[in-house]
Image (spheres, coloured by chain):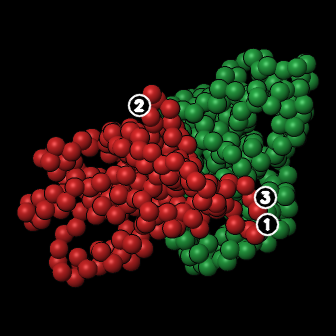
Chain colours: A green, B red
Amino acid sequence: MADDKDVLRDVWYGRIPTCFTLNQDEVTEREAEPYYLLLPRVSYLTLVTDKVKKHFLKVMKAEDVEEMWFEYEGTPLKWHYPIGVLFDLHASNTILPWSITVHFKNFPDRDLLHCPSNSVIEAHFMSSIKEADALKHKSQVVNDMQKKDHKQLWMGLQNDKFDQFWAMNRKLMEYPTEEGGFRYIPFRIYQTMSDRPFIQKLFRPVSPEGSAHTLGDLLKEMYPAAIPNEGEQKRYQVVIHGIEPLLETPLQWLSEHLSHPDNFLHICVIPTPTD
Amino acid sequence: MSLCLLDEDSFRSSCKLLLQQSEELRDSWTWEPGSSEEGYLKKIALKSVVIDSSLKWNLIDDDEGEAADVCGLSEGSSSSQVFQYEYHIVYSCSYRTPALYFRACTLEGRSLSLEEVWSSVHPNLRLRLKHCPLNTITQQEHPLLGQPFFLLHPCRTQDFMRPVLQAAHQQNRSVNYVLTWLSVVGPLVGLDVPLHYSISSSSTKPD
């Protein structure tokens, strides 16, 4: 059970100061000022940028506007990853505010999912929660919930209501005490160095001998290069919610406390900056 | 019921069998290897499809709590057009089932939109789509390629596979999980599985 409420709050209220700038090639009637916003790490880009869109539409003609999308230093940003994951993965070691370019043309079909409305975000969010529960409880908890309970999870995220969300999400974080954790830990390990978007496999929180698996154990199995050998220089940073948790941290605890609202533990492996 | 679950090794051996048959039947499935042992089955097919443009999909939220629904049967034209479909069978470790990813484009290379895909599915699936389109087929990131694909959502797979597998188990018949599953879900999105697959599989039954 997730009981460390301060940690849950800190994770929920994590913000990234961001500067949105209109792409230079967009046709405008006058110059577009940049727009500044504090982005919630646990939310989705397309869910929290209504104001950004409104701001830039003021200087554009309706016929020059197609679906809005975002880019950071040439990389189209996948709205279906939580904002914090996008930042940690692509922009961890840059100067704040995070500078995002806004586009209204040439939607990169081959890279990004379309996001025509909030119900598409909701469907994506709920399908992640269902997938996570399939891993944690063979779908039993999420299937026992009613439609209004699902709605409560979504509305909690959409309206940034910590208590509303967690009143329901705590059910998804329960497990039988004698088992010492979930059936499997819902996690994804991201890296920018390969075409493959992320690693996701089955991994139990407790070893067959009964000891708690740690973050280090998970990485050793899924991404051994992320752990430095004895006496070797650290080549990678392992980042969750902008911090580098100790590799000795029990995975079950991380899953309960540092998972995103979609119930997945998103782990970014990024090259250590060379300065 | 562990009977209804498919582990990754069985997925691969199921796929291998299907590939052998595909070769015999001159179907065009291929195995695309990923990193290490992972990979997926792939097939590209040209298909003439009718997109029912009289269906209007409403993706804007309303107050009823229904995320999206289909409405209004206006007078629309439904003409048949040729599209290139690309189907991938990928293993889902979360649901421990196969998952069907696909994308489609016109011969000029324009990608089909989600609404167009919804309007082109088999009428049997349209009923379910009417109620909850966004729980049935959505655009999702391909887990191995990182590109947008349509996904027929796999969370109900166990429900319809259970009776088939149980019956086969009772009768001591061997079943190719992936093939049986594909024969159910494929036709919903335009992928026909020739009957010859199951004829040849019963004649060349492994042990």
| Front one among B190 and A178 | B190
Disc 1 crowd, CA 10 A, few/some/many (<14, 14-19, 20+): few
Question: Quick check: A157 left or right of A89?
Answer: right
Are the residues under badges 3 and 1 in a single subunit?
no
Measure the C-alpha gap from mark 2 to mark 3: 41 Å
Which chain does the residue under circle 1 lie in? B
What amino acid is labelled 2 in the image? Leu
Identify the residue position indicated by label 2 in the image: B107
Q: Residue furthest front?
A: B75
Q: Is residue B131 visible?
A: yes
What amino acid is labelled 3 in the image? Leu
> For residue A157, which numbered disc appears in the image?
3
Measure the C-alpha gap from mark 2 to mark 1: 40 Å
Q: Label 2's element?
A: loop
Q: Position of residue B140 (x, y in %)?
A: 55, 47
Residue located 81% across and 46% down the image: A48
Q: Position of residue A54 (x, y in %)?
A: 87, 37
Identify the residue position indicated by label 1 in the image: B63
- From the viewer's perspective, is the residue at label 3 or at label 1 nearer? 1
Question: Quick check: A45 left or right of B14?
Answer: right
Q: Earlier in the sequence, mark 2 or mark 1?
A: 1
* Vertical side of A182 occupied by B54: above or below: above
What amino acid is labelled 1 in the image? Asp
Measure the C-alpha gap from mark 3 to mark 1: 18 Å
Q: Residue furthest left?
A: B203
- Quarter of the image with the C terminus of chain A in it: top right
Q: Residue furthest bottom?
A: B170
Q: Position of residue A186 (x, y in %)?
A: 57, 58
* Vertical side of A188 occupied by A268: above or below: above
| Front one among B47 and B35 | B47
